[in-house]
Each structure stands twice: as structure tokens, then as C-alpha cells.
Image (spheres, rainbow, N blue to C red):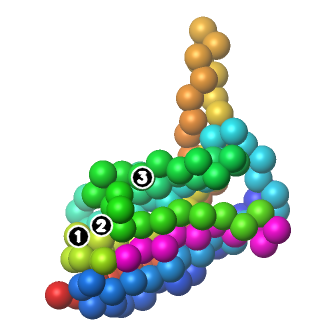
Amino acid sequence: QVQLVESGGGSVQSGGSLRLSCVTSGFIISACGMSWYRQAPGKERELVSTIYPNNDATYADAVTGRFIVSQDNAKKTMYLQMNALNSGDTAVYYCAANERRFTGLGIASCHPNIWGQGTQVTVSS
């Protein structure tokens, strides 16, 4: 079973930056790519960003223009560069490897399949 390990979290003042890393213990080959999620206290876990094998990326509206996701296949590592952080970004950040699932009608969709343990990001004003 492939394992994911996040690092790079910490405490930072509003307006600051952090870079998160997610190292995989093996190669993950999925058309659904890998994602970053976050969960703030008392809130549901939310999708932050997804990066696909061709390096296409998507972002949640709340982080568009501030966060950049990237990957280094040789290092088996995914990154999340977080800039202009604000208190709303305070959360535990998780990386996830996605898999493609098919319904009985053959309709495909992507779902997180393997999770890391999470890394805490705290932004103070």
C-alpha cells in the first residue's frame, strides 16, 4: 500500500507564505492525479487543489491566485506553495491520491483513495 507523508506546515503571520510537501512511498499512476484538501476546526474537509499527470491543475475559488500546486515525479513529491495567507487558511492540510471509479453505467469519476496524515497550518493576524 502506497503511503503519503505531508510536511511543511507551521505557524505564519497573515500575508506570509508556506510550502507544503507530500511524499509518496511509491509511484502513483492515475488519470485522476493527486489533490490537496484542508479541514478547519468545526468544518467539513474541502478540496483545495488537484494536479493531473499532464500538470494541469484546478483550484478552489478561495485559493485561486494565491496557491500553486506542482509535482516532481522524480522525487515522487507533490507541493503546495501557499502565498498571501490569511486566517481563513488555518486548517489541517491533507494530500490524497485519487482513483477513478466507474458506475454501473460506465460513468467515470475521481475520488480520493489514499490519504496522508495531515499537517497543521496556522495563520495569525
Please provide percent x and percent y for residue 6. 58, 74
Secondary structure at numbered mark 3: strand
- Could you tell me if the residues under marks 3 and 1 are in contact, i.e. CB atoms within 8 Å? no
Is the C terminus in the top left, top right, bottom left or bottom right quadrant? Answer: bottom left
Which of pointers 1 and 2 indicates the residue nearer the eye?
A: 1
Query: For the point 69% across and 39% down, which residue is it?
Result: 31
Please provide percent x and percent y for residue 61. 30, 51
Which of pointers 3 and 2 indicates the residue nearer the eye?
A: 3
Is the N terminus in the top left, top right, bottom left or bottom right quadrant? Answer: bottom right
Label the magenta part by its dominant secondary structure: strand
The residue carrying mark 3 is 59
The residue carrying mark 1 is 88
Up the image or down, 12 lies above or below 92; here it is below
Q: Answer with left or right where residue 59 lies relative to residue 51.
A: left
Say whether residue 79 is magenta.
yes
Please provide percent x and percent y for residue 19. 50, 79
The residue carrying mark 2 is 40
Q: Earlier in the sequence, mark 3 or mark 2?
A: 2
Up the image or down, 82 lies above or below 62; here it is below
Say whether residue 8 is magenta.
no
Q: Residues within 10 Å of mark 2 (few under 14, many from 20)?
A: some
Q: Which residues are magenta?
A: 74-83
Query: For the point 63% across and 47% down, which residue is it?
Result: 52
- Could you tell me if the residues under marks 1 and 2 are in contact, i.e. CB atoms within 8 Å? yes
Q: CA distance from mark 1 to mark 2?
A: 8 Å
Query: For the point 64% across and 52% down, which residue is it?
Result: 55
Amino acid type of disc 3? Tyr
Q: Answer with left or right where residue 118 lies relative to residue 63.
A: right
Q: Answer with left or right where residue 15 lies relative to residue 46.
A: left
Secondary structure at numbered mark 2: loop
